[in-house]
Amino acid sequence: MAMSTTLSPPSYPDFLRSPSYTVEPQRHEQRIALGQGLRPRPSGQFVKESKSRGARLRLNAQEDNIDLPVYGSASSVEGSIEVTKPDGITSVEVKVDGRLRLHELAAGGMVTAKLCSETVILWIKDPSNATCPMAMDFRCSLPATFVHANNTYSLPPTYDVKLDGLPGFTAAIDYNVTATLVKPNPVPLVKGSLFGKSIGNIILSTPFVYHPRTRPAVPLPSPLRTNRLGFILEPDWKLYESQIASRQSNTADIKTKLYIPASRIFCMAQPIPFHLTLESSAYSLAAFLPYGPTANLIGKRATRIQLMRQATVDVRHAMISSTKTDIWRVDNIGEATFAHAGDGPTWVAFSGTIRIQNSVKVAAFKAGGLSVKDCILFTFSPADPAKSPFAPLRQVVPARLTTDVWTADGTGMGANLTNGSECSIPSTPEDAEYAQVEHGAYAM
């Protein structure tokens, strides 16, 4: 009879708490698996010095030569306070906080939400500890979620957006770390205070970028092949059908078939692949040729595929005459290029990619009255609709972006990730409630 063996976890000494994590195994531990593509933790530091040169705020685990510190989901803001002039200091504390601010213009209202707030007291002067230490380490953990108006949301990334004009809005999400070295001023309080704060205090403050990172759980699929009828649909692609209606009795409608990767979750640093088939009579396809995606035209093409981003602000959460009072702006963040992929007597096929603008740095999110969503937009919009033999078309396919590319060890197991981790993002971009693991995206 064959014997089977199993690996048991190592025995640990009796601790009152969980053992501390170490990068390398301890003497009584054994490494049984190691993920590929480990990302080393940054070894640089971000330093902010006071104007008087009496103190420094030093933040660890940062890339070299950065403008602002950067942290990811489930990260900790770690560092130290260094004091070169300790005389007169009575206490030292560090605070990490984040705010969401929404403002609807034209008297729409304003909302401010607290995203996070943690204060750590590093030292307080007392008879047994009268001199301020020269160096004090600290660590503040960023929460995974926040609560606003009885709803729980994932902690959103650093972000700002505005819509000029009336109606319009401004929206901002910002995070800060502030060190305060309390140093009472010898001048009486009335003369030595400004807006309730002692002017003798040393305050070191810097904004930081909160940048949660995610990556798809599945890779981009292989391109579709064609046969005599057009593209051959595969399980990892999804077909979206529509119709470009004809305005002339002797011209048939054109059936459109847009093929998008089934997950609809894409890395913002990679082009999004797609396929498009137009099906109709030979006469209709010939009439459509000047409006096609590869037509040699000067100016805007009639047939386009774009990646659009909608930022929506809702301060009042109200309905007027059954209409929501939210305000939004829509931006084109990616444009498609097309190439002829084949044709037949009653069809013509194209393949292409959507290249996302380099300015796009964050994925979609919802935080209180601010939401950011992405979608693929397929349009037929002739320059002169009255003279076109075909009616305009607008088709929307929800999509979602990630910050990083898919990797074979997509779960991140065993990886020393720079910016922390969080739950996987939804597989169905329309609604997190219907997420499925096979088409999800893992956070990094």
Image: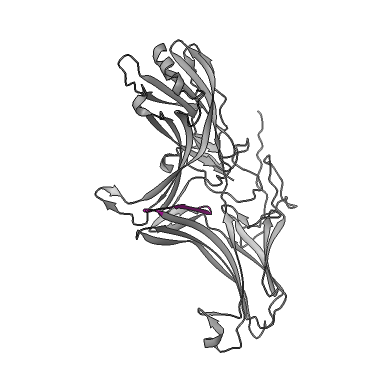
Which residue in the rendered view is the most extreme toward the right? Answer: 27
- Can residue 325 be seen here? yes
Depth check, front residue: 92 or 53: 53
Q: Please identify the quarter of the rendering in which residue 244 is found.
A: top left
Q: Please identify the quarter of the rendering in which residue 330 is found.
A: top left
Magenta span of residues? 156-168
Q: Residue at x 59, y 88 (%)?
A: 187
Describe residue 332's horizontal placement relative to residue 178 as left or right: left
Q: Please identify the quarter of the rendering in which residue 394 is found.
A: top left
- Whether residue 147 appears in magenta in the rendering, the answer is no
- Can residue 224 be seen here? no
Up-down relation of residue 300 to residue 189 (above or below): above
Describe residue 390's horizontal placement relative to residue 84 as left or right: left
Depth check, front residue: 125 or 350: 350
Up-down relation of residue 69 to residue 356 (above or below): below
How many marks the image carries: the answer is: 0
Up-down relation of residue 436 to residue 280 (above or below): below
- Kindly report the secondary structure that dominates the magenta region of the rendered protein: loop
Q: Give the image location of residue 78, x and y in percent.
A: 64, 61
Describe residue 21's horizontal placement relative to residue 365 as left or right: right
Which residue in the rendered view is the most extreme toward the left? Answer: 321
Q: Give the image location of residue 182, x and y in percent.
A: 60, 78
Q: Give the image location of residue 226, x and y in percent.
A: 52, 16
Q: Give the image location of residue 81, x and y in percent.
A: 67, 69
Up-down relation of residue 5 to residue 317 (above or below): above
